[in-house]
Image (spheres, grey):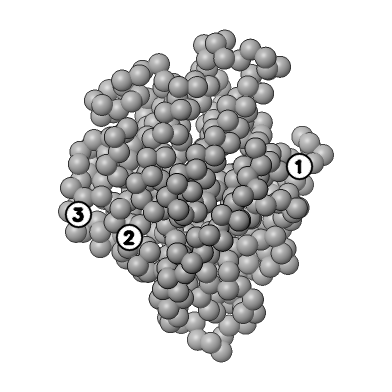
Amino acid sequence: MRRITRRGFAVTVLGAASSVLAAGAAATADGPAGAPAGDRTVDSGRSRHEMRGMWLATIGNRDWPSTPGRTAAHQQQELLAHFDEAVKSRLNTVIFQVRPTADALWPSPHEPWAECLTGVQGRDPGWDPLGFAVREAHRRGLELHAWFNPYRVANHVDPRRLAATHPARVHPDWAVPYGGKLYYNPGLPEVRRFVQEAMLDAVRRYPVDGVHFDDYFYPYPVAGETFPDDAAYAAHGKGFANRAEWRRDNIDRLVRETAQQVEGAGRRAGRRVRFGISPFAVWRNHATDPEGSATRAGVETYDDLYADTRRWVREGWIDHIVPQVYWNIGAAGADYAELVSWWSRTVSGTDVDLYIGEALYKAGDPAQPAAWRDPAELSRHLTLARKHPQVGGHVFFSAKEVSADRIGALARVVRDHYGSAARP
């Protein structure tokens, strides 16, 4: 199913979105401190429409809330501070993690309240974080994309630690342990139907601007362990040449069906909801497949996560793709320049937009290669990407680093490239 109606449908809702976009332009007019107009050495004024996003992660309280169990007022103020930092840096999109471990940051009828809010999974925090986030993001002219992790259940393997009503306890056959974590089994059709319904509940309830998946499909490989899906493969794997093909088909179905449902939910609500995915950036290495990138990465999404990211682009199942190009320019195993070029060629001629995921978290980290200790490294990324017309913007990981900006790498990006506001 090629989603050829997306851009046409967007035209019908453009007027409804204009007030939000205009508010964003006004809100970001002043920009960050320390970025005087005379220092904007790279910004060409070209990009009035581009993605300038940040991920806001809630798993393990990475970005927000800073600690679980604070009052609703305190958590709201923390969240607003992140939104205000995004505006200050002339960003226009927040990708907000609302389903971190098969639990929810809204009053879901399908899954318990998220543990990150109160410290106890299933405990009502007394407010609606997703509803609040959508409202306050839009007030600031920011798009709010709801970020879901489809299959991760817990960062441990003990179902007894889950809320009593958690679906993985109600249906213990749905979940499998692997690598010290608990996952829903992607090979079960009933699991795929359930996670889609759980995620779509948020799209129906709230005027989110997008649905976002990250890079977790089948889990990253763990040395010495095999993902335990023998029974599911025996029951559902007939007609496939091998288990790898069956696993890829499971993930293809998840992506294709979710795309259809997201588009349908948006149309029924009279608005457009974009569907995007942010995969690990290496589809396949060239040594594995001549059509792969000239990289030597240890993980290939096609073979290790059973995620055929290139196919999703070619089939037009998604609106945009945000490969996590988390390497520096010139990195030996995976060069930023090579991967931006490969993805630009991959989206060329399709209806899928390309945004580049940027590793802001590495900037200034002494454990990273020397390039990441140079405040200008990220700015050079944007300069290089502008040589590829297919690149429509960048998303920074993540909100905590947007606020801290420990060596001024984001301030340099803003100074060099974000001299004026941009609409998504």
> Element at badge 3?
helix
Q: Residue at x 37, y 69 (%)?
A: 140
What amino acid is found at the position of numbered circle 2 in the picture? Arg
What amino acid is found at the position of numbered circle 3 in the picture? Ala
- Is 58 displayed left or right of 243 in the figure? left
> Element at badge 2?
helix
Q: Which one is nearer the viewer's eye here, 23 or 285?
A: 23
Indicate whether 178 appears above or below 3: above
Residue 72 circle label: 3
Where does the N terminus fall, quadrant-wise?
A: top right
Q: Whole-Å distance between the Cαs marked 1 and 3?
A: 48 Å
Examine the rendering and report whether any part of residue 218 can be seen.
yes
Q: Which one is nearer the viewer's eye here, 256 or 359?
A: 256
> Element at badge 1?
loop
Q: Which residue is drawn at 56% across and 54% down?
A: 9
Q: Whole-Å distance between the Cαs marked 1 and 2?
A: 42 Å
Residue 161: horizontal and vertical position, in percent? 27, 27
Q: Which of marks 1 and 2 is nearer the N terminus?
A: 2
Determine which residue is flagged by label 1. 292
- Is 413 displayed left or right of 297 in the figure? left
Q: What crowding class fits label 2: few (fewer than 14 Cα within 10 Å), some (14-19), or many (20 or more)? A: some
Q: Whole-Å distance between the Cαs marked 3 and 2?
A: 16 Å
Q: Earlier in the sequence, mark 1 or mark 3?
A: 3
What amino acid is found at the position of numbered circle 1 in the picture? Gly
Determine which residue is flagged by label 2. 135
Residue 205: horizontal and vertical position, in percent? 34, 46
Q: Which one is nearer the viewer's eye here, 287 or 284?
A: 284
